[in-house]
Image (spheres, rainbow, N blue to C red):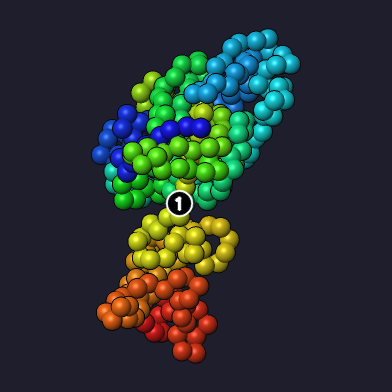
Amino acid sequence: MKRFFISAVICTGSLLLWNCKPDDNTAKVVDRDRQEVFNDNIKEIENFLKTNIVEVLEDGVSFETVASEADNSIWKQTEYPLQSMTVKNLPYYTNSNGLQKQNDPVEYKIYYLILNEGGGETPMIHDDSFTSYTGYNLDKSVFDKYQFGYWSAYPAYSTYTETIAGYRQILEKIKTATSITDNGDGTYTYENPGRVLVFIPSGLGYFSSPSGSISAYSPIIFDITLITKKDADHDNDGILDKYEDVNGNGDLWDDDTDGDSKPNFLDLDDDGDGYTTREEITYTTTENGETVKKLYDFDKIPTCEGGSVKKHLDKSCH
């Protein structure tokens, strides 16, 4: 059982997790080719996996060098079977200039070990997630550690920061804690959280931007514990992100009902009729003799007369 604080304060001492990108007004550098860098990174990562063993500790892991492809190497051990997945970079990232499009054609391979699956829920890519972590360079040095946990989001919004792509994407492989108990003193305890050890190529990390003791173009390792998650409403329009996937393909970025280049989950007026989505899903009722305004539950949002879609997506009415 673990004890922790849940707080809205983000990244105290944890700036290395931010999805850092150079600002437009900084000196321009010529990046190396992303595919070339990934090709080098994956060789480095696979060599590390073949020449090291891992000991799983309560608050981190310990690595030790062994002969290449030894039976107890990370590459061959079976206690925590080595797995991999192929992913593309996230389509957008956030910096001081706001949301920026990511143009990255590389298909990245990520190796990972599930240290504990967890007993709760698996987050979607856009869910708000509360995690703790330890970060390692391939020389086995710790570059950052945050054991108390913090909230992150994708993309960044409100007070929630945005993590690097590889960190965010691996969370979909584990689950939150089975239970969380409020201790009544500002702390909480949790049981059976998901935990994953992930080896991230620099293209899904900091790439050409050195960060602390992380060098440019360096792959990194994270030991991540997923404590809890919650559904996000990025634009605060009263409709959770998970319900803004109009075409149901799992990609929130290609749902743009009014064609204004803002996806619905970031758009205050989804159908572009001049009335905010929040206005259109608000109704008036009476409670205890008083008139109050409330928001429809998503499945109860009405359609327009003669229409077939919910009213906040139908420009013909409001």
Q: Residue at x 32, y 29 (%)?
A: 13
Quadrant for residue 206, please give it.
top left
Residue tagged 1 = 230
Q: Nearer the viewer, residue 58 or 179?
A: 179
| Left or right: residue 83 compared with residue 17 | right
Q: Nearer the viewer, residue 311 or 210?
A: 311
Question: Against 272, is 52 above or below?
Answer: above
| Left or right: residue 125 compared with residue 144 | right
* Residue 290 rendering spot, x and y as whole percentages: 27, 79
Question: Against 90, is 52 above or below?
Answer: above
Q: Residue at x 36, y 82 (%)?
A: 318
Q: Residue at x 45, y 66 (%)?
A: 256
Q: Residue at x 45, y 37 (%)?
A: 189
Mark 1 neighbour class, 10 Å CA radius: few under 14, some 14 to 19, many 20 or more: some
* Residue 172 rendering spot, x and y as whole percentages: 56, 44
Extreme-bottom residue of the structure: 306
| Helix, strand or loop at mark 1 | strand
Total marks drawn? Answer: 1
| Left or right: residue 44 compared with residue 296 | right
* Residue 263 rendering spot, x and y as whole percentages: 43, 62
User: In the rendered image, is residue 204 in sight?
Assistant: no
User: In the rendered image, is residue 196 in sight?
Assistant: yes
* Residue 155 rendering spot, x and y as whole percentages: 40, 49
Give the amino acid type for the residue marked by disc 1 in the picture.
Answer: Lys
